[in-house]
Structures are given as C-alpha cells and as structure tokens.
Image (spheres, rainbow, N blue to C red):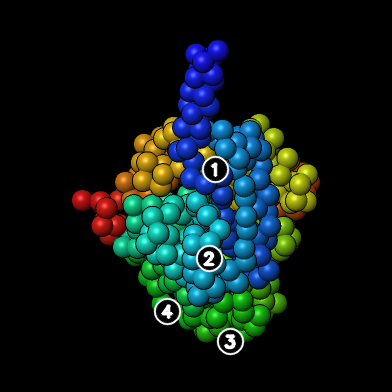
Amino acid sequence: MKKLLLSVGAMALTGAAAHAEISDGVVKIGIMNDMSGPYSAISGQGSVEAARMAVEDFGDTVQGSPVEVVSADHQNKPDVGSSVARQWFDTEQVDTIMDLTTSSVALAVQAVAGENQKITMNTGAGTTEITGKACTPFSFHWAYDTHALAVGTGGAVVDAGGDTWFFLTADYAFGYSLEENTTKTVEEKGGQVLGSVRHPLNNNDFSAFLLQAQSSGAKVIGLASAGTDTQNAIKQAAEFGITQAGQNLAGLLLFITDIHGLGLQAAQGLYLTESFYWDRDDQSREFGNRFKERTGAMPSMVQAGVYSAVSQYLKAIDAAGGDDATAVAAKLKEMPVDDVFARGATVAPNGRLLNTQYLVQVKTPEESTGEWDYYKILAEIPGEQAYMDPAESGCPLVQ
C-alpha cells in the first residue's frame, strides 16, 4: 500500500511540474488598439474576435493551461497605452500585448514591454522604428510596415508614370515614416517630391490641405494616413474635382474596410498594398467567411495578422515548453510561419516577419461580382524584397 501511495504522489508531483512552466497557470493575451476612433474598423473589436478564433482553433489551452484574451482601447494616446500596459503587466499577469494600431502608441507600449521582458507582436502600427532603433529582444512586427507600403504602392505608381508627388501626411510617427519611406522609393525610381503638408489625426476637413496639394501641380497626391482620415481625404478630393482635373491619389495605406466604406464608385482604380486578402485562395476564403459570420465584415490585414500572431505565439509556447518570454521569443525567431495569413514566411533577427505583400487594384463596380469582391491581385512581392534589410534597420540586436 505504501508503494502505491508513493507512486500516486510521484505522479501528482510530476503532473504539477508539467504545468509549472506556465506562469500563474494561465496564458493571458492582451489585444490593445483603437476601439472607438478612426482605426476601429481595421482593428478594434474585430482584432479581439480574430484572437479568440486563434485560441479556439488551437484548442483553448497550451501546455495544459488555459488561454485567455483581454482587450483595451488605447484611444490613440501613448500615455493611455503605456498606463494600460503597466497595469496589465504589474497586476493582471498579461503575458503579451498584440495589435497596437497607431505607431506612437505602439512605440510607447513596446518600450514598457521591453522593460518588463514581455513580448509584443505588433500587427496594427506601421512605422519601421518598431523593428529599427526601437526594437527590443521581445518585440515583433507582424503584418506590414511603411517600407513595404512604399515599395508596393509607391513603386507601382511611379512605374505607371506618377513621377511627381505631394504628400498629405498624418501628423505622428506613422505618417512621418510612411512619407519618408515613400519619398525614398519615388526618388530612387527617378521621381520628385514637390512638397508635403501635415494634418492632425482623426481630421474631418481636408479642404485646405487638398488645395495646397492641388496648387503644387504634382501628378500624384500621396495620402500618408489611414482609416477614416484616408477615406475623408479621398471623398473630399472627389468633391473638389481634383482627380477629374488630372491629379491622381495614392492611398499609401488602405484596408479592405476602407474600400467597403468608400464604395467601388469612389475607390475604383486605386492601387494599394495588402498582406492579406480574403479571396486569395480556398484557405483564406474559409477563414474570411468564418470571421464575417462573427463580425459582419471580412477581415482586414491587421485582424488576419492578429489571428496569425496569436497562433504563432501559442505554437512558440508549446515548442518552448513554457511561457518564459526569452525562450518564447527565441522560438518565434526560429520557427517558420505557415498559416492562413503568411505562407512559408520567416522572422528576421530584428523581429520583422518577412511575409509576402500583394499589390492590388480596386475593381470597378462592373468587375465586382458582389459584396467584398473588391481586389485584383496584380503582383506578389516576396518579404525579402518588401521589407528593409535587417542590417540596415538600425535595430541594435542586428550586427
């Protein structure tokens, strides 16, 4: 009888040890983004649902411990994002923060996470600083960045004859980075930038900015913005007859939700760069339709990126045998990414996911076969071409 009791006790200890590698017995994933402002359609509650889908598809547990998803609205304010991050890390045992739409907030939260040795997986913000001078051993950039947008959309527009540019730029880190990267692409291809003007985030009236762009005489007005800012600029440019007069708009960051909001009549013919399109293949269609059943809309590349980031994070915990951030970060950089979002992609030493980008053109109303059938895929841009060379990124982790 004593031998039997000892065996049972040993089994219990062994079982406890098997779960001991998950800190506090729960893996908690925080989704932080814009839940109510100009970027809420591209991220918002849809990103939370994408995270929940990934957890459910993984089986709701990892290494025998439950996985939870929590969320917060950072209101596009770096101080709010930093405060939430500290509370999550200090008192709520959140293990990782993802999405982080809005570059200024993303950089602030990434710094807090680095100090606390916690992983961030950014799908929503675009600035290349995330995997540049602001990189940490625990930071990852997952869906797109401003360099990839410049290579895709900016390069295509110059190649099509748009060799003089004027920028309408959102007045914060993302807008600056997008203008800087696109300017470099335009000039490398022999084009010229005639000027730029900066507008506040969540702006409603673009009339003064558009008039400056119109008076520049540039062939292309580059919209270095996103969300409702880009939608408002496109609508008001049409009202002023800018495109009818011969100038072209280049939406440097547009999402499928933006096209849905604008309608094909207003958006037709626009070039844009995407890292995900729901109608790309059978696997993406299956995911897109499941997401639409839960949210009422097809997923943006940010939301699809959240699904991928959560899935890969859980796989990395499984491979590492626990949720220690250093071990998980090493696995994230070691393991290939092959899922509905990214096919056969790798992660660079600076934390940049080198996923394929797609140059697309918005269909005309006559070409579309129904709701959400919005894109023609014109070209695939391999990740190694779309993104900055890690050695040139400024990330101190890369020699």
Q: Is residue 309 above or below residue 102?
A: above
Which residue sits at x=21%, y=51%? 399
First-in-chain label (1 vs 2): 1
Identify the residue position indicated by label 1 in the image. Answer: 25
Which residue sits at x=42%, y=64%? 112
How far apart marks 3 and 1 lie (CA) works out to 56 Å
Which of these two is toward me, 279 or 74? 74
Look at the numbered disc 2 and give the secondary structure of its residue: helix
How far apart marks 3 and 2 lie (CA) works out to 41 Å
Q: Residue furthest left?
A: 399
First-in-chain label (3 vs 4): 4
First-in-chain label (3 vs 1): 1
Which of these two is toward me, 208 or 28? 28
Which residue sits at x=31%, y=63%? 133
> Alpha-carbon neighbours of circle 3 within 10 Å: few (<14), some, or many (≥20)?
few
Q: Where residue 346 appears, x then y in whole percent?
A: 40, 39
Question: Marks 1 and 2: which is nearer the front?
Answer: 1
Q: Which three-letter amino acid code belongs to the residue tagged 4?
A: Gly
Identify the residue position indicated by label 3 in the image. Answer: 208
Look at the numbered disc 4 and give the secondary structure of its residue: strand
Identify the residue position indicated by label 2 in the image. Answer: 87
Q: Where residue 225 appears, x then y in whole percent?
A: 54, 69
First-in-chain label (4 vs 1): 1
Look at the numbered disc 1 and give the secondary structure of its residue: helix
Q: Choose top left, top right, bottom left or bottom right for residue 92.
A: bottom right
First-in-chain label (2 vs 4): 2
In the rendered image, is residue 327 in sight? yes
First-in-chain label (3 vs 2): 2
Identify the residue position indicated by label 4 in the image. Answer: 195
Which of these two is toward me, 367 or 302? 302
How far apart marks 4 and 1 lie (CA) works out to 55 Å
